Image (cartoon, rainbow, N blue to C red):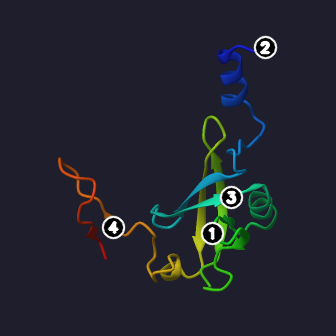
């Protein structure tokens, strides 16, 4: 049996990419637009989506609701060309830096980001009024 320190060294300091998918076979992928540095979306990737992304240079994700692979922007025109893929220290999350063909169509709401609302800080109930930024 290996020690926790040895496991951490193996995972955190390795030069090998060994993604650690969750129990459902998924990894969260945070997507950042290269030009602005803005976080534009978060999506899930399974092994097939990750492989397609790495092979083609276009972002592919796994739709949990449709149970299907999808190439981002294939219908909207907001194709995401992947510039860089980073993994976190324990290789169970990704950050994709992308260039977006039609940034205004990144979100299905017609916005350039899915993160267009702010949750106010401070005491009070979790059910609170969101602030729109656009």
- Which residue, given by chain and number where applicable, does mark 1 sit on? 65
Question: Which residue is at a point 18% across and 50% down the rendered structure image?
Answer: 124
CA gap, disc 3 to disc 2?
Answer: 31 Å
Q: Where the N terminus falls, by quadrant?
A: top right
- Which residue, given by chain and number where applicable, does mark 3 sit on? 45
Q: Residues within 10 Å of mark 1 (few under 14, many from 20)?
A: few
Q: Percent x, y for residue 20?
A: 71, 41
Q: Is residue 132 above or below residue 128?
A: below
Front tag of 2 and 1: 1
CA gap, disc 3 to disc 4?
Answer: 24 Å
Q: Percent x, y for residue 16?
A: 78, 37
Mark 1 touches mark 4? (CB < 8 Å): no
- Which residue, given by chain and number where applicable, does mark 2 sit on? 1
- Which label's residue is closer to the chain start, 1 or 3? 3
Q: Which of the two residues, 98 or 64, is positioned nearer the viewer here?
A: 64
- Which label's residue is closer to the chain start, 4 or 2? 2
CA gap, disc 1 to disc 3?
Answer: 13 Å
CA gap, disc 1 to disc 4?
Answer: 23 Å
Q: Residues within 10 Å of mark 3 (few under 14, many from 20)?
A: many
- Which label's residue is closer to the chain start, 1 or 4? 1
CA gap, disc 4 to disc 2?
Answer: 47 Å
Front tag of 1 and 3: 1
Label annotation for residue 104: none
Which type of secondary structure does the marked residue at label 4 adopt? strand
Question: Which residue is at a point 70% across and 30% down the rendered structure image?
Answer: 11
- Which label's residue is closer to the chain start, 2 or 1? 2
User: Residue 22 occupies which quadrant of the picture?
Assistant: top right
- Which residue, given by chain and number where applicable, does mark 4 sit on? 117
- Which label's residue is closer to the chain start, 3 or 2? 2
């Amino acid at each position: 049996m290996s020690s926790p320190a040895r496991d951490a060294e193996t995972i955190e300091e390795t030069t090998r990419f060994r993604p650690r998918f969750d129990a459902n076979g998924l990894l969260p992928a945070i997507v950042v637009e290269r030009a602005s540095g803005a976080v534009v979306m978060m999506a899930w990737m399974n092994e097939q989506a990750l492989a397609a992304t790495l092979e083609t240079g276009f972002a592919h994700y796994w739709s949990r609701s449709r149970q299907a692979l999808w190439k981002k922007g294939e219908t909207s025109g907001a194709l995401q060309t992947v510039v860089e893929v980073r993994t976190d220290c324990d290789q169970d999350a990704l950050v994709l830096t992308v260039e977006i063909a039609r940034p205004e169509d990144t979100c299905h709401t017609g916005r350039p980001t899915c993160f267009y609302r702010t949750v106010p800080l401070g005491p009070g109930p979790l059910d609170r009024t969101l602030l729109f930024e656009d």
